Amino acid sequence: MRTRRINRRRLLGGAVLLGAGTAGLPILTGCGDNGGGGGGNRPLRFAWWGNPERDERTNNAVRLWSDRSGRTVNTEPANWEDYWASLTTQVAGGNTPDLMQQDYQYLKEYVDNGSLLALDDYVPDPLQIDQIPEDTVNSGRFNDALYAISMGYNTFALVSNKGVLADAGVEQPDDTLTWSEFFDLAVRISENTPDGVYGSENAMNAMEPFECWLRQRGKELYTADGRLAYTAADVEEWFQYWMDLIAAGGCFTTEQDAEGTGALEDRGVPTRTGGFDFHWSNVITAFVDLTDDEVGVSQYPQGDAPNSPNGQYYKASMYLAVPADANDPDAAVDLMSALIFDPEIAGELGFERGIPAAEPVRAALEPNLSEAEQLSLDYVTSLEGVVGPVPPPPPGAHAQIYEQFTFFSEEAGFGNLTVADAAQQFFDEASRLLEA
Amino acid sequence: MLTDTRPPVTATGAEDAEHALRAKRVRRARRRANRAVFLFLGPWFFGLAAFTAGPIIASLYFSFTDYNLLGSPSWSGLDNYAGLLDDVHYRNALRVTFIYVVVSVPLSTAAALLVAVMLSGNRRGIGLYRATYYLPSLLGGSVAIAVLWRQIFGADGLVNQLLALSRLDGLIEAVFGVEPGTSWIGNPDHALNTLIILHIWQFGAPMVIFLAGIKQIPADLIESAAVDGASRVQRFFRITLPLLSPLVFFNLVLGMIGAFKAFTPAYVVSNGRGGPADSTLFYTLHLYATAFRFRDMGAASAMAWIMLAVIAIFTAGMFLTARYWVYYGDQVKLR
């Protein structure tokens, strides 16, 4: 709590301060016994990427903080794509929101460019980071300084439509399922269900399951110094697995996959046209809401080699960070702290951003969980102790490399290139992008 | 412009002085008027400098730098331009855009001309028809229509349902080798075609221009040709088309520039990816992705300048050919 010069500030009236170039004048964070009441304070801006449910939950949480602190907050939700386009533009223009949602993929780049505020001065008050698992905290630490704190964490989750599985006379698999068993299972589901229903979503062009698959072989997407940590042969094997599964009818074709919008509600599990889908665990609740049938969750298939690791890790799902040039960093950090550590305010967010990082928040939510949230929590906590280490942060070119991955998997899927050529060309292209 | 207000040399001294005085007054008044002109033009000049010329010059500078928007730009010479040559997607984007321009612009101009000729008569309710045919170009650029296009050309879309109902799908398979139930937008062989059709469908604006042009053609020319026994087709090709050729030229040039810059339909139909397999990767879409998704503002600026050069060359090329086929009434054609 930072309450400075509150009386003087009141005397002067917020409006005067507002115009007076707030840089030199400490403006209170608006919390605590004085009741805040900064009617004349510039509103805070808080931006995140999300979906309608997240936007509603976040707005509710922010409103609670506003009522308590007396500060107005302008919220700026957007979808993933637009969010990053506008955030980079705002950073370039010196117009960054006071509080922003960040992703592991971009965090390092923002830190390296000096765009984020080091938060160490705010530890442990108000940022009680001892409530968060150490690994998770450390994922927001760069060059020995803390720049971002995760709101929650996720793991890979193989989501299934139990109705489709039951129609095919197939049991919900457990966590011992291997990739080759998954192959047969998917084909069996396609065969024993009506035309147009497939065993699995086509994940050939998705790098998340590819990453899990690599980790099961003791590899990673990237080394700590930002190079590729796999070979073209790995890519070829991955592409070939899916080409075989497509040919066997076990998953959607490349064409069907390309036609899809990628929106959750159009995917196989909710529309009852697919048995399995590869996703992050934070969408389990959304899948349950969208699907009439019961939804099952298990780990991604395991490596076929005996005793291979499960490839899983706790991925800090979304971070909050404050820009280095924030007008009012105290207030921004206070809002950030409430959204992560305050059981009441963070509780409004539920499990939508993954399992809440702060233990007390999770504990406070636990008695009143919906069935979907319980499913999600049980699954993620079942991996405690068996998840692997967090991979190093991906390099700045990751987004572009991902796009190449999709492109070359389509080139192979449509038969424009052989699988071997597609894999090699992807690998060359990705290497080139990392050198640039 | 009146610049010499000096009196003739024969004038007397008094007249001379009076003239000089008057001239001075006139000059001062003119200068005051000039000041007012600049004052009123000021905001426009400011806007031009700050919001048009400034960004254009900045983008030229950025095109020679390595700039990811977060940091500050650092000089990299011609690296961005050279890098584009290595980029397989850049080549795909060029190819897709050229095909789009070369196919869709002539076809949509032809469609506009055809419909304009059909709607040029004075029949009952002709206004309604004209409005109806103009409607798609009001809607066509919108996101909603592009979304609708996804529905129409999807695997279970309207097109496939109609083909199945009318039992034409077998014929299509026999002639074009397209299996029934093919997703027209999910298949790289057809995705661009659906966007070309979308573009052709929006012929409203050139159609209106053609209609206005047809109304200008003297009726007696057509009548006398008809009296001389020219058929409808002959009248069209010998009279209407030559007289409309300036408008054809105009519509082709504008259409071409617009097609080079097309963005929305591809963005919406392919979810911003230009997929499947780059088959709808319009130049502008790749430029946008490079700038905002890959945060390589330097390369994106280089792409924008190359685009400018390409459009300039195409436009210049069309103006060069124009003298051979565009007929302006005041020119005498020499053969």
Image (tube, rainbow, N blue to C red):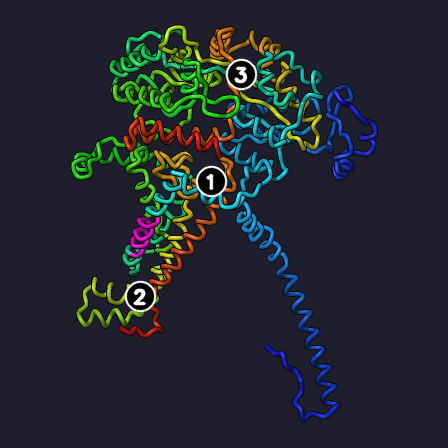
Q: From where the camera sits, is residue B125 visible?
A: no
Badges 3 and 2: C-beta atoms under 8 Å apart? no
Closest to the observer: A418 or B303? Answer: A418
Q: Are marks 1 and 2 on the same chain?
A: yes
What is the quadrant of the N terminus of chain B in the image? bottom right
Q: Is residue A144 magenta?
A: no
User: Are the residues at dot 3 and dot 1 in contact (C-beta closer than 8 Å)?
Assistant: no
The residue carrying pointer 1 sits among few (fewer than 14), some (14 to 19) or many (20 or more) residues within 10 Å by Cα, namely many
**Horizontal arrangement in the rendering, residue A339 relative to residue A231 (left or right):** right
**Image point (22%, 70%), residue name:** B225
Q: Secondary structure at mark 1?
A: helix
Crowd tier of the residue under label 3, counting other residues whose Cα lies within 10 Å: few below 14, some 14–19, many 20 or above: many
**How far separated are the C-alphas under marks 3 and 1?**
31 Å
Q: Amino acid at mark 2?
A: Tyr
At which x and y percent is residue B173? Answer: 18, 35
Q: Chain of mark 3?
A: A
Q: For the residues marked 1 and 2, what is the alpha-carbon distance in whole angstroms?
A: 38 Å
The reply to whether the magenta stretch includes residue B108 is: yes
Disc 1 marks which residue?
B288
Q: Position of residue B159 (x, y in %)?
A: 27, 36
Q: What residue is shown with label 3?
A: A153
Q: Image quarter for residue A32?
A: top right
Residue extent of the magenta highlight: B101-113
- Relative placement, left or right, of A380 versus B88 is right
Residue on which the image places disc 2:
B324
Circle 2 crowding by C-alpha within 10 Å: few under 14, some 14–19, many from 20 = few
